[in-house]
């Protein structure tokens, strides 16, 4: 199939050709004609599948036909969970809409509101926004939705994880009832389906990746290591293997900063990207990473969400996420577009519970590989695959805190940090230093066999 058969007009086809895309990706093939027919959509697709173009292309086509936006009006609204994703979606809108006369804008929290209000004054055809800032702008009378034709909810699962459900419901109430709705989510939990019920009407359902499955072209392995040795191990792995571009995930902002300092102390160029960093610092770190000015980008899950970095060769989980689905999102950053990538997790004994939850979610045991100088004192217990089905998650409780793209002073629902068990109940067999691969039945890889 090629793009000419999807029903898109010349200016859009010209912009696509300029990007050098040969053929639509599977999600684009299915979504574009359905959206052009005016249907609502529910699509299960992760970053890297071409989902942004899947909604942007038909959205531009539809908007190119109608009346332009009047002052302070918006014709299409794209909601995203993070600032980075909002900026990237806006960049795609500008790219694919280069040969059209449509106006677009992006608004998110963490930067001054006044310039955003000025931009909206003349009206915009497409507005990409994070939910909190959008509501702020609405309350300040900078926005009206009378002309709204189309709503896109991007990465809906992450919006819920980040506690935006109330904001989203508020926004839905402000929009005209007659509109087209497109909902994109990496996974479709019961919670998302409940949200969808009140939002989309008779949607076309598309799924391009089975929910919660990991990307096939990603080689996953883990190194059991004591917590205190993780920074040294990471430095060793990067230097020994000459990894040139590494995205490292840290569970906490402080952990990310600490790790950055350690890496820099060992003459490795690194930068951290997380919610406490200014927007300017985050944008600079990402640009430096993309242009190979820094070798290592250390990110928290929320900040990393939606980062568009193609074909990243190495993703490292410096610590395992508390929410197993985040593991799938994290490793989705590598091995894109047919290129293989490696996802390496540094796992200490106290993270066994998280490891077991991840292995249960992805329904596979992650290959273990011991590094000679880093054999842990606190041994990581042997994994056994839990094949029981996973129950749908309950909605999370309110928790104070400020999240990306959210208004200051407002409560957010966030990840509930898992409580560590008392030391006596934790996994691991201190004192037994025999590497698990010698005793475990599961497949183990030798150092020589590691893919480069
Ligand atoms: P997304 O899933 O929207 O994050 O897109 C991932 C990457 O795929 C982006 O860098 C796009 O530029 C690229 N892309 C989108 N559609 C196509 C296509 N049809 N052919 C090749 N690359 C594409």
Image (cartoon, rainbow, N blue to C red):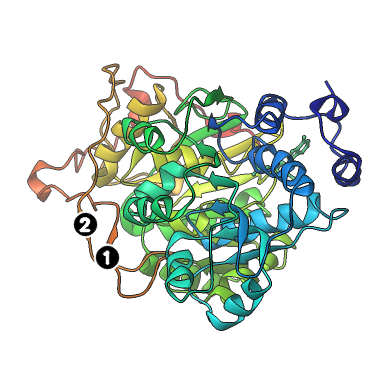
For the residues labelled 2 and 1, say whether their Cβ atoms are less than 8 Å apart.
yes
Tag 2: Cα neighbours inside 10 Å, few (<14), some, or many (≥20)? few
Decide: is 53 above or below 266.
Answer: above
Decide: is 361 above or below 199.
Answer: above
Tell me where residue 391 sits by quadrant. top left
Q: Which quadrant, please, contains the N terminus? A: top right
Residue at 52% of width from left, 55% of height from top? 304
User: Can the viewer see residue 269 in this picture?
Assistant: no
**x, y percent for residue 25:** 73, 29
Residue at 51% of width from left, 38% of height from top? 183
**x, y percent for residue 180:** 57, 39
- Side of 329 where 169 appears, left or right: left
Decide: is 207 above or below 432.
Answer: above
Tag 1: Cα neighbours inside 10 Å, few (<14), some, or many (≥20)? some
User: Can the viewer see residue 384 in this picture?
Assistant: yes
**x, y percent for residue 97:** 80, 52
Tell me where residue 219 sits by quadrant. top right
Q: Which residue is mark 2?
A: 398
- Side of 452 where 154 appears, left or right: left
The label number, if any, that marks residue 177 in the structure image: none
Ligand 1 - quadrant of the structure image:
top right
What is the spatial separation of the Cα atoms under label 2 and label 1, in whole angstroms? 7 Å
Report the front residue among 296 and 367. 296
Residue at 52% of width from left, 40% of height from top? 331
Ligand 1 neighbours mark 1 (CB distance < 8 Å): no
Q: Which quadrant, please, contains the C terminus? A: top right
- Side of 197 where 70 appears, left or right: right
Q: Secondary structure at mark 2?
A: strand
Q: Mark 2 vs mark 1: which is more N-terminal?
A: 2
**x, y percent for residue 64:** 78, 48
Report the front residue among 361 and 243. 361
Q: Which residue is mark 1?
A: 411
């Amino acid at each position: 199939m090629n793009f000419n058969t999807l029903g898109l007009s010349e200016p859009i086809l010209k912009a696509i050709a300029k990007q050098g895309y040969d053929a639509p990706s599977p999600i684009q093939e299915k979504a574009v004609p359905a959206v052009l027919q005016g249907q609502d959509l529910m699509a299960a697709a992760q970053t890297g599948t071409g989902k942004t173009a899947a909604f942007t292309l038909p959205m531009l086509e539809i908007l190119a036909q109608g009346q332009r936006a009047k002052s302070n009006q918006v014709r299409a609204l794209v909601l995203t969970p993070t600032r980075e994703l909002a900026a990237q979606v806006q960049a795609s809108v500008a790219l694919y809409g280069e040969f059209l006369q449509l106006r677009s804008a992006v608004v998110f929290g963490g930067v001054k509101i006044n310039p955003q209000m000025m931009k909206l004054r003349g009206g915009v055809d497409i507005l990409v926004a994070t939910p909190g800032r959008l509501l702020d702008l609405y309350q300040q009378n900078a926005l009206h939705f009378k002309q709204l034709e189309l709503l896109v909810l991007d990465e809906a699962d992450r919006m819920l994880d980040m506690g935006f459900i109330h904001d989203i419901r508020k926004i839905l109430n402000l929009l005209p009832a007659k509109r087209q709705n497109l909902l994109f989510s990496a996974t479709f939990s019961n919670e998302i389906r409940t949200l969808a019920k009140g939002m989309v009407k008779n949607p076309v359902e598309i799924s391009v990746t089975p929910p919660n499955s990991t990307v096939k072209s990603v080689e996953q392995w883990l190194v059991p290591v004591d917590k205190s040795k993780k920074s040294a191990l990471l430095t060793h792995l990067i230097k020994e293997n000459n990894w040139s571009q590494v995205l490292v995930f840290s569970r906490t902002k402080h952990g990310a900063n600490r790790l950055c300092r350690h890496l820099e102390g060992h003459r490795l160029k690194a930068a951290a990207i997380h919610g406490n960093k200014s927007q300017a610092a985050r944008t600079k770190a990402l640009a430096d990473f993309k242009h190979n000015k820094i070798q290592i980008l250390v990110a928290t899950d929320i900040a990393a969400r939606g980062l568009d970095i193609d074909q990243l060769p190495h993703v490292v989980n410096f610590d395992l996420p508390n929410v197993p689905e985040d593991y799938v999102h994290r490793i989705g950053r590598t091995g894109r577009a047919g290129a293989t990538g490696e996802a390496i997790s540094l796992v200490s004994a106290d993270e066994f519970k998280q490891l077991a939850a991840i292995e249960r979610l992805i329904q596979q045991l992650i290959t273990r590989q011991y590094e000679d100088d880093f054999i842990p004192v606190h041994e990581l217990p042997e994994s056994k695959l839990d094949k029981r089905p996973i129950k749908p998650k309950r909605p999370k409780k309110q928790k104070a805190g400020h999240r990306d793209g959210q208004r200051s002073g407002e409560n957010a629902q966030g990840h509930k940090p898992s409580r560590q068990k008392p030391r006596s109940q934790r996994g691991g067999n201190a004192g037994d230093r025999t590497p698990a691969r010698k005793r475990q039945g599961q497949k183990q890889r030798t150092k020589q066999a590691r893919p480069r």
